Amino acid sequence: MTEINDTPTVPVAVLDDPRNEVDVQSEDRPLRRSRMTREEYTDLAAAFLTGAAGAGLLRTVFGWHGLIGTGVWWYLLFIAAYYLLQRDAASNEVGLDRVVTVVIWSVGIAVVAVLAWMIGFVVVRGYHKLSAGFFVHDMRGVGPLNPGGGVRAAIIGSAEQVGLATLAVVPLAVLTAVYLQELGGRLARLVRFTINALAGFPSIVAGLTVYTVWVEAGHGPSGAAGAAALAILMLPFVTRTAEEVLRTVPDSLREASLALGAPQWRVVMRVVLPTALAGLTTAAILGVAIGVGETAPLLFTTSYSDLTVWNPFHGPQSSLAYYVYTYVLEPNKTQNQRGFTALLILVILVLVLFVLARLAGRRNQRRLGRSR
C-alpha cells in the first residue's frame, strides 16, 4: 500500500537562497534611529530659541551680568521646552527618551569642547619656544632673561623616573592580577582590598611617605625616590586594569588546556598571558601615562636641578612635571614661556601614550574575538 506524503515540497533553490536565512544576531540587536526627522529638528531649534529668550528675559529682569549663570538658565529652559514639545508631539516616554538623548549629547560636546579649549590654550601659550634646541639644552647657566635653555634635564629625569617605576610595577602588577584572577586563595580578598585602598590614596600621600621613609632619613632627594613614589601610584591602577584584561580571556581556552592535561601554571603562561598580551600592554602604557603627568609626589622626593643628572640614585633630579610647576609660577615672561612649552611637550607625550593604549586595546579586542 502506497503512503501519501502531504508535506509540501520546497525547491532546493529556495532553501539555498541566502536571502531566506534568518539573521539571529540582527534580531538581538537593539533598533537604533539613524537620523532625526525634520519635525524634530524644528522642535530642537524652537526649544533653543525659547531657552535663549527666557534666559535673556531673566537676565534683563534680575540684572545678571555673569555669562555662566545665564548659560545655565538657558540650558535648563531649553531642556524643559524641548521635553514639552516632544511630549505633545508623541508621548511622555518618547519625550523623556529624546530629552535624555539631548542631555547625553550636550554633555559629550561640552567635554570635548573643554578638552579642545585646554589643548588650544596650551598650544597658543607654548609653541613660541618649541624648537630643536629646546630639547637638547638644559638650564645650566641660563638666567631668567636669557633666551636659551631647554628641557633636556627634565626629559631625561622623567624618562629615568618613570622607567624605573615601570620596571618595578609592571611585573608585580601582572603577577598580582594573575593571583587574583587565576589562582585566588585566602589572601585574595585582602590583596584586592589593599589594591583598591591604594587606588584611592591622594598622590601627595605617596610623596610624603617616600619623603618620610627615605628622603628625611638622610638619603636626600633623588630620581629613585621619585620613582618609588610614582610606583606607589601606578601599582594599583596597572593591577586593576590587568585583572580586568585577564577576565576577558574566554574560559573555554582554560578549560580546553586543562582538559588536555596541562597544569595550571602552564595554562597561565602559555594560554592566558599570550592571549591577553595586548591588553596587558595597554595597562602598562596607561600606567606610564599616569606616572608622566604626576607632580605632587615629586615635590617631596626629587627636588629640582638645572643640570642634567644621568644617575637617578645620586642627588636631586628634574622632571617634566616639576619643570612646568617651577617655571609657570615664575613672574618672568620668559620663564613662563619655558614652562608652557614644557607643558605642551608633556601634553603631547600623554596624548601619544593614550593613543598607543587605544590602538593596543583594539588589537586585544580583535585577538579575543578570534579566540572566541
Image: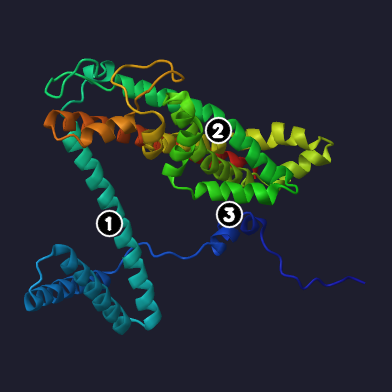
Q: Residue at x 29, y 56 (%)?
A: 109
Residue 194 place in picture, x, y as percent: 60, 48
Residue placed under numbered mark 3 in the picture: 18
The residue labelled by disc 2 is: 169
Percent across and percent down for residue 205 are 45, 43
On the question of residue 43 being in view, the answer is no
Kind of residue indicated by mark 3: Pro
158 lies above or below 56: above
| Mark-to-mark CA distance, 3 and 2 | 53 Å
Q: Residue at x 22, y 47 (%)?
A: 117
Quick one: which residue is furthest to the right in this view? 1
Q: Tell me the CA gap for discs 3 and 1.
A: 46 Å
Q: 351 or 206, which is in the foreground?
A: 206
Disc 2 crowd, CA 10 A, few/some/many (<14, 14-19, 20+):
many
Residue at the location (64% across, 33% down)?
274
The residues bearing labels 2 and 1 have C-alpha atoms spaced at a distance of 35 Å
Other residues around mark 3 within 10 Å, as few (<14) / some (14–19) / many (≥20): few
In this view, the residue in front, 218 or 91, is 218
| Residue picked out by circle 1 | 110
Residue 243 position within the rendered picture, expressed as x and y whole percent measured from the top left: 60, 44
**Viewport quadrant of the C terminus:** top right
* Amino acid type, residue under disc 2 in the picture: Val
Q: Is 26 placed left or right of 179 in the picture?
A: left
Q: Which residue type does callout 1 highlight? A: Ala
